């Protein structure tokens, strides 16, 4: 990324995150306690359909905290530049992890394997993406290792492939990375670039049962401060709390989510068809929603690869990756992941802006619609096209 674009994107990010910071300051947490319900719910909303089952992640995190104690939470801006930060995550198909749980100690094993290979002593654990289980697995690792957790992540949402993180466009390497399965197998990849990390780790994950725990993107505190999306876990907690508050006050919880994320309500209806398959370690497919109520007669089509990547309304693309596409229960606003979409569900679709840095040319080459095989330019969360971030 050249200097001009770096400066421009920094300004955009500062403007966007300033508003978010003002919103989350009042609810910013200093530690994560044993009740992770709001955090897990909010993480699944930001996960845009991916990131794994939020209920499983919540149970794992709460069990680890009950055993080891609360996890301190450190703001990105408060991070020492010399800190040694190691993120940890689940890799593979979320549909598989629902039935094949990680083993006890597997999360700490991934971190320790990478730290041993690098010859470093980790000072902090981090989330690589915001998403159901991938926002809570790092809580487990931090609790088991007695380390603080970073209040931020590398995406501000979830994406399906290793190289699809903001640190990639700042030159941070995904490898060396560790990978381990629930049977005790483990390994280290050291690749020539981040795309090769994905290319080699994906088939390994398939051979290890389509669900592994990885530790990747080891960074200094300075690199985290430059490339991470700040305040993500606090925002997740705030989102979950807002849903519960809206329900208790008999307000529309789906509208509350759209308002908090500065997004829009696209349409709502009944799920009438879901095509889902697990191929090459991903959950891929499409879902059709027939409109009901004020949206009667309208048709919504969702395309996904772990996460929702494209939504069409009456045959017209309304929002595409990298902006956020979220499917929520029509009445309760409970997030609906791509693996849990079922015929007959009543849902509503919410779209919201992504971190502005995702709309740079470098980032769109990583996560734009054409990368995923959709022959169209990015469509922003409000339906506009060809508008710079």
Image (cartoon, rainbow, N blue to C red):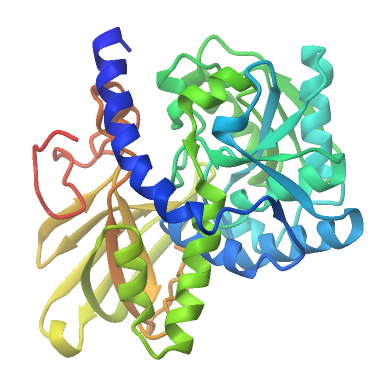
Picture quarter with the C terminus: top left
Q: Is residue 361 visible?
A: yes
Which quarter of the picture shows residue 84?
Answer: top right
Say whether residue 67 is left or right of residue 133: right
Q: Residue at x 55, y 61 (%)?
A: 237
Give percent across and percent down for residue 78.
61, 31
Give percent across and percent down for residue 250.
39, 91
Question: In terms of depth relative to the viewer, which is nearer, 366 or 323?
Answer: 323
Say whether residue 122 is left or right of residue 330: right
Classify 135 as above or below 204: below
Which quarter of the picture shows residue 32?
Answer: bottom right
Classify 196 as above or below 141: above
Q: Which residue is drawn at 26% across and 75% down?
A: 289
Q: Which residue is drawn at 8% across and 37% down?
A: 386
Classify 93 as above or below 180: below
Say whether residue 92 is left or right of residue 2: right
Q: Is residue 287 visible?
A: no
Q: Which residue is drawn at 82% across and 63% down?
A: 63
Give percent across and percent down for residue 176.
67, 17
Residue sitting at the far right: 67
Give percent across and percent down for residue 156.
44, 44
User: In this figure, what is the number of numbered marks?
Assistant: 0
């Amino acid at each position: 990324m050249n200097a001009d674009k770096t400066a421009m994107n920094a300004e955009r990010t500062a403007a966007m995150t300033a508003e978010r910071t003002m919103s989350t300051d009042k609810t910013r947490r200093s530690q994560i306690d044993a009740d992770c319900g709001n955090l897990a719910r909010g993480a699944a909303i930001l996960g845009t359909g991916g990131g794994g089952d939020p209920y499983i992640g919540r149970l794992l995190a709460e069990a680890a905290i009950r055993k080891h104690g609360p996890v301190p939470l450190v703001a990105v801006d408060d991070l020492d530049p010399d800190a040694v930060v190691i993120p940890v995550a689940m890799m593979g198909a979320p549909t598989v992890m629902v039935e094949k749980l990680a083993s006890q100690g597997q999360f700490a094993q991934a971190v320790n394997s990478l730290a041993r290979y690098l010859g470093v002593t980790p000072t902090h654990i981090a989330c690589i993406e915001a998403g159901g289980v991938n926002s809570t697995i790092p809580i487990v690792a931090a609790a088991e290792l007695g380390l603080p957790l970073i209040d931020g992540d590398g995406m501000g949402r979830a994406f399906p492939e290793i190289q699809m993180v903001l640190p990639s466009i700042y030159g941070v390497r995904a490898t060396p990375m560790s990978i381990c399965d629930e049977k005790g197998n483990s390994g280290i990849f050291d690749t020539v670039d981040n795309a090769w990390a994905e290319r080699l780790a994906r088939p390994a994950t398939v051979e290890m049962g389509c669900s592994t725990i990885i530790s990747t993107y080891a960074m200094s505190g300075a690199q985290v401060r430059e490339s991470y999306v700040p305040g993500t876990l606090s925002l997740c907690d705030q989102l979950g709390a807002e849903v519960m508050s809206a329900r208790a006050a008999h307000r529309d919880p789906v509208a509350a989510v759209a308002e908090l994320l500065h997004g829009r309500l696209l349409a709502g209806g009944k799920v009438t068809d879901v095509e889902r398959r697990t191929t090459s370690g991903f959950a891929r497919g499409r879902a059709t929603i027939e409109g009901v109520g004020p949206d009667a007669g309208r048709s919504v089509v969702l395309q996904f690869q772990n996460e929702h990547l494209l939504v069409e309304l009456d045959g017209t693309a309304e929002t595409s990756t990298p902006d956020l596409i979220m499917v929520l229960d029509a009445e309760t606003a409970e997030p609906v992941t791509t693996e849990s979409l079922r015929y007959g569900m009543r849902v509503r679709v919410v779209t919201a802006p992504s971190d502005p840095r995702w709309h740079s040319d470098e980032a769109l080459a990583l996560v734009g619609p054409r990368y995923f095989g959709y022959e169209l330019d990015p469509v922003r969360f409000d339906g506009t096209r060809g508008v710079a971030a």
